[in-house]
Image (tube, rainbow, N blue to C red):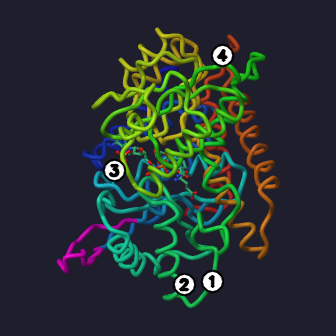
Amino acid sequence: MDKIAAEFVQNFMANVIAKDPLEKEFHQAVREVVESLAPFVVQNPVYMKARILERMAEPERIVMFRVPWLNDRGEVEINRGYRIQMSSAIGPYKGGLRFHASVNLSILKFLAYEQVLKNSLTTLPMGGGKGGSDFNPKGKSDNEVMRFCQSFMTELSRHIGPDTDVPAGDIGVGGREIGFMYGQLKRLSNAFTGTLTGKGLGWGGSPLRPEATGYGTTYFAQEMLSTIGEEIAGKTVVISGSGNVSQYAVEKVTQLGGKVVTLSDSNGFIYDPEGINEEKLEYVLELKNVWRGRIREYVNEFKGAKYFENQRPWSVPCQIAMPCATQNEVDEEDAKTLVANGCRVISEGANMPSTPEAIHVFQGNKLFYAPGKAANAGGVATSGLEMSQNSMRLTWTRDEVDARLHRIMKGIHETCVQYGKESDGYVNYVKGANIGGFLKVANAMLAQGLV
Ligand code: NDP
Ligand code: 2IT
């Protein structure tokens, strides 16, 4: 980076940090983007003069609200609800809702900021947003989750709509929660619209939406490998998490002939050297989605597997790693271990799972490293396809949606190569995704005047 670009980054970050000094995840996400865009905006002063990057780091609107609800003992509980409406430059705000005890403004702002660029990369007309609550769904009954979702939606419903803001799932928000929220929204608005995505198949949902993020992350790994004439078949894959994204990453990797040997949750990971095949995945789906159990229970069912308490799976040798749990789950040491053990491809199903130091290790060793905003965009892309189907009042087949998803993931890969290829031929997917995602949003902002 030249001196002017470096100074630009320094001043930019000083301002962002001075405004909200405690929001470290937000700073991390912004810094990564601004570092890769600084040389580009310095060379293209039109973006600099209009202060596009500065405007993109300031949410168009933030809504914060009280969510009171009654637990099963009849006691009053109070959580905090949020919706960050980050950018509507290229379409209605779009992005998931996260229910997790750790949720705060910093985490939701980083997610909303990433979402703007991710949604742009899909080529579909979607702006960016994110929301959620510090509600912890673990150990809550279905009735408690329903009462919480109804209270949450009672307020959120004032701020969303099919042409305004279309939420979906994220950590702690899956089919059950979307169902409860959609029921309440419909009751309040007296309209059956496409205002939430991730709906059930029989009531407005799209085929393949549950599978889309995990499938898409796998398709992206496949695209990276294809640039050197290799494929997933025969490779060992380490996956973290055991929720929605991880489950369908296991399914697609296995279908393509790869062997997934790990899954995890916040308590530890399981290692199954024989691979998590279709039958074992069936068990995981039931364990996590029906019984809402913990991943350690896997080893009671499959004796060849081992459980490692309080550890992450990155020490297990593999050629491909897919972090699919949460932010900053791969640190510098983990990255060095992965590289030392022969890992060559990282495809991120989660949002910002690698720390900046870990990314530095991956890129320094010339790994194929795909950041979440490119590699996990299949989820929101398929949400965009759900919106299209809702607007047309029809449903495409599973094969049609899969073909579109596959095409979109290939397109994102091409965009990353177009903007990320360096002089020695190495593809910097971070730079490619950031510039590729930025351009459409920035040009829309220029065209729309000072808003
Ligand atoms: P789920 O709630 O279905 O699963 C989350 C998984 O990650 C669980 O196994 C959970 O374990 C684990 N996890 C969550 N927080 C932590 C933590 N602090 N430390 C360790 N493990 C943790 O969520 P999703 O699968 O939907 O989301 C996973 C990631 O993918 C997130 O980063 C999300 O933002 C991203 N993503 C999701 C998309 C989607 O369509 N759902 C689309 C694009 C990205 P535990 O049960 O112990 O909490
Ligand atoms: O991070 C993400 O892209 C998501 N959680 C999915 C968002 C969506 O609107 O489908």
Task: Name the residue type under label 3.
Answer: Ser
Sequence-earlier tag: 4 or 2? 2
Tell me what residue is drawn at x 33 percent, y 38 percent: 14
Is residue 233 visible to the viewer in this orientation of the structure? Answer: yes
Which residue in the protein does label 2 denote? 186
Which residue in the protein does label 3 denote? 106
Label 2 secondary element: helix
Q: Is mark 3 within 8 Å of ligand 1?
A: no
Mark 2 or mark 3: which is in front?
2
- In the picture, measured across the screen, residue 371 lies left or right of residue 385, that is left
- Between the residue at mark 4 and the residue at mark 1, the CA separation in whole angstroms equals 48 Å
Does the magenta run of residues contain 76?
Answer: yes
Is residue 8 visible to the viewer in this orientation of the structure? Answer: no
Task: Name the residue type under label 1.
Answer: Phe
Specify start and end residues of the magenta stretch as a single range.
Answer: 66-82
- Between the residue at mark 2 and the residue at mark 3, the CA separation in whole angstroms equals 30 Å
Which residue in the protein does label 4 denote? 426
Crowdedness near tag 3: few (<14), some (14–19) or many (≥20) residues, C-alpha within 10 Å: some
Mark 1 or mark 3: which is in front?
1
Label the magenta part by its dominant secondary structure.
strand
Q: Position of residue 449 (x, y in %)?
A: 62, 62
For residue 192, the mark is 1
Sequence-earlier tag: 1 or 2? 2
Q: Position of residue 344 (x, y in %)?
A: 58, 16
Q: Position of residue 330 (x, y in %)?
A: 40, 28
Looking at the picture, does residue 288 appear above or below residue 187? Answer: above
- Between the residue at mark 4 and the residue at mark 2, the CA separation in whole angstroms equals 50 Å
Sequence-earlier tag: 2 or 3? 3
- Between the residue at mark 1 and the residue at mark 2, the CA separation in whole angstroms equals 6 Å
